[in-house]
Each structure stands twice: as C-alpha cells, then as structure tokens.
Amino acid sequence: MTMKVLGYATHSPTDALAPFHFERREPRPRDVVIEILYCGVCHSDLHIARNDWRNTIYPAVPGHEIIGRVVSVGPEVARFKAGDTVGVGCMVDSCQQCAACGQGLEQYCEASSILTYNSVDPHDQMPTYGGYSQKIVVTDQFVLKISDSLDLAGAAPLLCAGITTWSPLRHWKVGKGSKVAVVGLGGLGHMALKLAKALEAEVTLFTRSPGKEQDARRLGADRIVLSTDAEQMKAVKNRFELIIDTVPYAHDLNPYLPTLALNGTLVLVGYLGDLEDMLNTLPLILGRKSVAGSVIGGIAETQEMLDFCGQHGIASDIELINMQEINAAYERMLKSDVKYRFVIDMASLRG
Ligand SMILES: NC(=O)c1ccc[n+]([C@@H]2O[C@H](COP(=O)([O-])OP(=O)(O)OC[C@H]3O[C@@H](n4cnc5c(N)ncnc54)[C@H](OP(=O)(O)O)[C@@H]3O)[C@@H](O)[C@H]2O)c1
Ligand SMILES: [Zn+2]
Ligand SMILES: [Zn+2]
C-alpha cells in the first residue's frame, strides 16, 4: 500500500510553500521507510522552488539534507533496522550499471542519478518528493549511517553542504598545509571552512560581506579576504592550490584566477549556467591553472565524510526553524542572512 504523507510544497515559481498531502510508494523489498526528524534548507531548494534552473516539476517538495529514524525495512535489507538513525542526501537512486556508478560516483551516473526531489523514479514513474515532509522511502544503498555522537539537527546539512565541499577537498587531495580558499560564507562555505581546517589545510575565506570575519575565524579560516577590495586580492596573488567557489549566482571569476598558484584549480560548486563575464585565459595558460566543476559526492564518499565528521565532532552551525517558517527563511537566505544553515525541525509538522 502507498503511504499518505504531509509535506510542504510549492505549485509555481511565485507561490509560497504550503502544506501538501501526497503519497509515497509502497515499500519494495530493498526499501527503508524513514521518519524524518530534521531537514536542512539548501540554496538548491530555493532554486528549485522558484524554477531558477528552468526544470522544476511542480508541485515541488524540496529538501535533501535529511536526518531520520528508520520505521521499517524491507525483507532484503540487512544494513538497517527499525530505530536506526540515518541520513539521506541529494540522491535516492542511480542506474548501478554505468562506468560512473561502477566507481562509486553515482552523482555522475551516465543515466543521471535519481535526485531526492525533482526527479522521476524510473521504476514507477512517480515524481520524487524531498525532505520537507514527514516520511521518505529510499532504497537501502542510498541510505547513510549517522554517528550517534553527532548533534542530529546539526548533522543534517552534512548530507549536502558537507559532501559537496568534502568531495572536491578529497579529489584535489587537500591535506596538511594545503593552501585552500573558499568563496562565499553561506551553508556550503561554512562547511568548507570546517572540513578544510579539519584536514589541516591553511584556509582562506573570500567574502563580499564585511562583518563575517569573526565567525569565519571561529569556523576555521586563517585569513579573510574581502573580494571587493583590490588591494586585499593582490595580497593573495599566486597563493591557492584549490579554490572552492560556492556563490549561487553568475559572478566574475577573473579576479580569482590570479590568486591561484601554479597548477591551481578553481572548482565551481555553486553557480550553474552561463557566465556573464568572459573568462580571461591568460592566467590559466601562464600558470597551468584550471577552472573545474563538481557536484555533491558518491554514496561511499558521503559515508566517509559522515564518519570523519563523527570522529572530529564536526556538524553544521544551524538555526532551527519550524516548517511553517520556511518562506521567511528563504527570504533571509537570499539576503545571506543565516548563520549558517537553516534546519527544519520536522516535529513542527507532526503538530
Ligand atoms: N554542486 C553541488 O553539488 C551543489 C550542492 C549544493 C548546493 N549547490 C549550490 O551551491 C550554491 C550555494 O549554496 P548554499 O546553500 O551554500 O547558499 P547560501 O547559504 O545562500 O550561501 C551562498 C553564499 O554566497 C555568497 N553570495 C550570495 N550571493 C552572491 C552574489 N550574488 N555574489 C557573490 N556572492 C554571493 C554569500 O557569501 P558572502 O556573504 O560571504 O559573500 C552567501 O552566503 C547554490 O547555488 C546551490 O544551489 C551546489
Ligand atoms: Zn543542496
Ligand atoms: Zn549509473
């Protein structure tokens, strides 16, 4: 039998999110049924709610930073049992057959991974609905184990903001003494600072916002550079092995390229789409520098990050909100007015 669930959805780019009743699929033999306790609020939720990427399927129930408790498992599930604390991130399935899936890189699945929201499940053609809801049903391979030592609300953003910044840190082999910079201090940015610091890198924050210095230092930055100040930008010329750029909107990359060291890489994780400013190839060519992109991380890598966070006591700095406050939270997120991730307490939806 399908399962009736209450969530929050929007029906058009301009509608507010509001209560929405819908059905989750009848659990399959490999499914885990999860009661959602907390769900982080990612800027991607807002992009999808407002059709910024022009691909939103309405009604849309966002949310892909999910922490919950297992209610029941199918007969073929061995890794989980009722009562376990678990996480679900941005993906709920993938083809499991392509070269990318074979390497544990499900986020790059050639058939395209099935996202937690705004996808269509290929098995039953049902739309996927995300974590702004009471329950979710997910195949066991895409369910993550959560260390009991972590604060559960603070752990929710690890499922997207955490893995999205962890994956490039690992891919570009950041370790002790690596010179890393992060552009933008929001949800992704603050996790990037924490994770890079825990990997013992030398960490710099680029921000447009004066006034974030003190927080940035507490979160792990050794240096803060105001990106609008040409002198400060000049002072970090040829410095960084890796820059992780989390800015959500089109912006000029040219000021950052000279700050890359020889062989350095600027990896975009925030903005999807055309750049308005032409990219100057000169610093790239003269310094063998790269501009790259990266999307979330694979399931094994997500578990690695969660275990690392469990060992190092790393969680997100959050503002806990009720489901009913989501529309105001979006407006604040648009003004970069959040320290540093909203997390929805799903108890507010149970009433
Ligand atoms: N690649 C992936 O897998 C992946 C995964 C998750 C999210 N994302 C995307 O990553 C982006 C960031 O997400 P988030 O949740 O971290 O967002 P967020 O919490 O809103 O943080 C974004 C930060 O970027 C800076 N910023 C915002 N608007 C800017 C502008 N117009 N110009 C320059 N800087 C600006 C601000 O930092 P300062 O005030 O410090 O400048 C802001 O705090 C979103 O576009 C999201 O969709 C991608
Ligand atoms: Zn996200
Ligand atoms: Zn695949």
Image (cartoon, grey):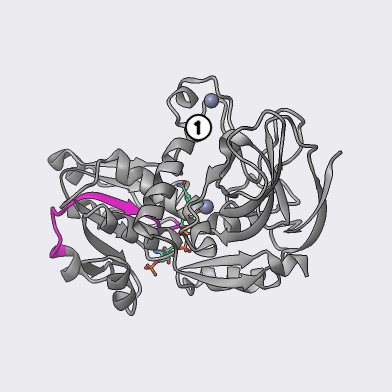
Mark 1 = which residue? 106
Residue at 33% across / 60% down in the picture? 194
| Horizontal side, residue 334 vs residue 60: left or right | left
Residue at 44% across / 63% down in the picture? 316
Q: Residues within 10 Å of mark 1 (few under 14, many from 20)?
A: many
Q: For the residue labelled by badge 1, is the local secondary structure a helix, a strand or a loop?
A: helix
Res. 191 visible in picture? yes
**Magenta residues, start to end:** 234-249
Q: Quadrant of residue 290?
A: top left
- Residue 341, position in %: x, y? 49, 66
Residue at 17% across / 38% down in the picture? 288
Q: Residue furthest bottom?
A: 211
- Residue 333, position in %: x, y? 53, 69
- Residue 128, position in %: x, y? 70, 42
Label count reads: 1
Q: Is residue 55 above or below residue 330?
A: above
Q: Amino acid at mark 1?
A: Glu
Residue 235 part of the magenta segment: yes
Q: Is residue 188 above or below residue 307?
A: below
Seen from the viewer's position, the closer of residues 250 and 1 is 1
Quadrant for the N terminus, please: top right
Q: Is mark 1 within 8 Å of ligand 3?
A: yes
| Horizontal side, residue 101 vs residue 67: left or right | left
Quadrant for the C terminus, please: bottom right
| Horizontal side, residue 293 vs residue 200: left or right | right
Q: Is residue 16 above or below residue 94?
A: below
Where's ligand 1: which quadrant? bottom left
Res. 51 visible in picture? no
- Residue 106, position in %: x, y? 50, 32
Residue 218 part of the magenta segment: no
Residue at 18% across / 50% down in the picture? 176
